Amino acid sequence: MRLRLSLFALLATLTLAAGALTALPAQSDPVIGPAVKVNNVAYAPGLPKLASVVDGSTSPLAWTVRDGGGQVVASGMTSVFGEDEASGDHVHTVDFSTVDTPGTGYTLEVAGQQSYPFDISAAPYEQLRYDALAFYYHQRSGIEIEAQFVGSEYARPAGHVNVPPNTGDDDVPCRPATPCDYTLDVRGGWYDAGDHGKYVVNGGISTWQLINAYERMLHVDGADGTALGDGTLAIPESSNGVPDILDEARWSVEFLLSMQVPDGQPQAGMAHHKIHDESWTGLPTLPHEDSQQRYLAPPSTAATLNLAAVAAQCARVWSGIDSSFAAECLESAETAYSAAQANPGIIADPNDGQGGGAYSDQNLDDEFYWAAAEMYATTGEQQYRDDLISHERYLGESFGTRGADWGNTGLLGDITLALVPNGLPSGDVTALRADFVSFGDTLLGLIDGQGYPAPYREQRQGGLWYDWGSNNLLLNNAVVLALAADFSGADGYRDGVFATLDYMMGRNPLNQSYISGYGEQAATNVHHRFWANQNDPSLPSAPPGVLAGGPNTGLNDPLAQQELSGCAPQKCYLDHIDSWSTNEVTINWNSVLSWVAVWAADNLPDDSQPEDTEPPSQPGTPAVSDVTATSAGVSWTASTDNVGVSGYDVYVDGSLETSAVSPSVTLGGLTPETTYQVVVVARDAAGNQSAPSGATTFTTDSDGEPGSACAVTYDSGPWTSGPGQGGFTAHVTITNTGDTTIDGWELEIELPDGQSLDHGWSATWTQDGQTVRATPLDWNATIAPLGSQQVGFNGLWAGSYTDASVFRLNGAPCE
């Protein structure tokens, strides 16, 4: 996240919430942890294996590698690199690439100094893509984060859905200082970072990179598209026939579309820059506990161009998946592009940092280029071609050793033009691909010219500068190396990508793995309002696969200023929740980590991925809970596997009923007073199946128990996205009109023809034909006599719109 203004106001908020800043050990010692710096996660078989050593000797030193049993498996002499500008260290390098036998607990010893242990294995790279992508479900706004997908430690209620103390995101006004005559329903999307703001300019690059990771699979020979397919992520939409990475991206696309100024209003078609709280919240604050008023910031040209670019990409990718959604995206993209052309210089206020980041961008030529590239790649229309070819950035003018980010998006346009078939002259596309390869050589030169493998260089204030979110910048340059490998087939660029991951996983001056859950010294105390265990031991630390921002020479937070004054650029980092300028997390940092992790798993050498013939272990016998007349919760002890379990198949009475990624499901649509038998089978990515679990038998409750006396209030309102079609929001209040408590319920709503469920909140929602079913969450499963529970959902309609009028609770009609 870029520097937010009102820093002292933010600090006051944080210190009031978290107490006095905790004093940390001084970091003046140039050796942080072991002097032998390795990737302390794993090196992949078949790839180079290098380490850095801090030692003042000007002569080579002897090194040895020992396996997990302590046996010496390789030895040699270091190469003296010398003084390293980015770290301030005197560095030696070790190349132990001959050590290639998979195993755990390897160590490297040099001059009596021993590294952290590391593995030789492809498995962490296979898993990282899924853990990095899982970040986005955690960050979702407007939906409950369910234990069946993330585990009970990370489960939480939906945030900002108009359940007090939230003011909610379904009816958000413009700020009083910049009023407008409308409100917007901007539920959904991802919380941008450690706070609760949602920003179009940061959502743009983040969403684009997830979709592009999938789109690359469509256009690069040999890419394994099944790795991103349906059923690969633990999200509610899994098993809906759509690749899960696109389901996740759509959660953000729909939010971006909702930020567009409506027709008939001033600046119609422009996109509001952001939506966030009136004032900064303290640490910790879970999303559903946020009581701040929410406001829309004024529209900006940058946000509008981000919307145009991502919506155009959406129209292209979803055209064969959901044609109506693709058409909605294209209409929004065309409207936004025209609005930006008509309003080319509306810059977000750089001083607008109260309650959320400013995200102001003074230079928009890169956004105009990116949007033109996406519009042309999708439509092939002449107006976009003309804008593209005449642009000063056309074909390869956006490369830079600092790397791309939310404020420097020209490279995204080049990636699309180089990957996606389009109507440009073939010579232009060939030249553009050659530019990726040429700049890849520049980045490899940066890696080779440093003591630690960082494909990055930025000069500022007379010296080397590591910018806010430097890890994201390094990884965006790793994307260039990855595409150089795709376009050239040369292994050196692939090796550069994995060298960059070595840096991220511990081969750096701090021995720091910047990816939570990965490595001996992994980032743990990231700046986040829920993953705040350092503030509140009852809350979790970050889940695996979350990228910390990394070294920041600017030292923009008071704790970093206090503890890191005078730090060498690569040592300007603290794994502390109060160091928000070095240790925050954001959606655009994890999006590039996800992109690179997907690419890395797809480009492991063949010999690092032996044929998998070992099935997962047998799952535990299912336990059944929360049985009602029509539903039951099923959970089981997870299986293990040599390369990882990819999912579970749940059989009811011998027939496959459903599949799950995590070891629990809720079975719905059951018949009252009926006995069922449930069995679970685990499977891995190679299709190997475990032995069936033990069988569990259970009987559903009777139709009338718990009580069926009920009333339903159905408050809905449609909106249009075209003639005879659109969406609607339904707020549903379920009232127990009987005299006994309802403990467990299932609500059925019969939708009129032409209507369908999109997504809901405060319940688990499914649809069968025109019947929509909602089952409760843990916190709203009971309804006291004369008490109520409120739930809701968004839907789609076609034809003509009418309200639903038929409701059943636990099978009984409701008033």
Image (tube, rainbow, N blue to C red):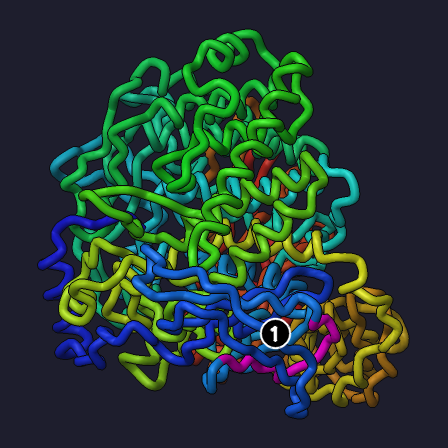
Residue 808 visible in rendering: no
Given residues 791 and 373, the one toward you in this image is: 373
| Amino acid on which the number 1 mark rests in the picture | Gly
Q: Is residue 702 left or right of residue 362?
A: right
Which residue carries the number 1 mark? 76
Identify the image quadrant of residue 47.
bottom right
Q: What kind of secondary structure does the magenta stretch mostly adopt?
A: strand
Q: Position of residue 612 (x, y in %)?
A: 84, 70
Residue 251 in magenta stretch: no
Q: Above or below — where is 747 with respect to 346?
A: below
Q: Secondary structure at mark 1?
A: strand
Left or right: 633 as drawn, with respect to 738: right
> Residue 391, percent across and down?
43, 14
For the question of whether residue 305 can be seen, the reply is yes
Residue plotted at (61% across, 62% down): 130
Give me the residue at 73% from left, 68% from top.
Answer: 646
Instruction: Point out the stretch of residues depicted in magenta.
Output: 99-110
Q: Nearer the viewer, residue 25 or 310?
A: 25
Q: Relative to 2, does residue 13 appear above or below in the rendering? A: below
Which is more toward the observer, 554 or 776?
A: 554
- Residue 163: x and y in percent read 34, 63
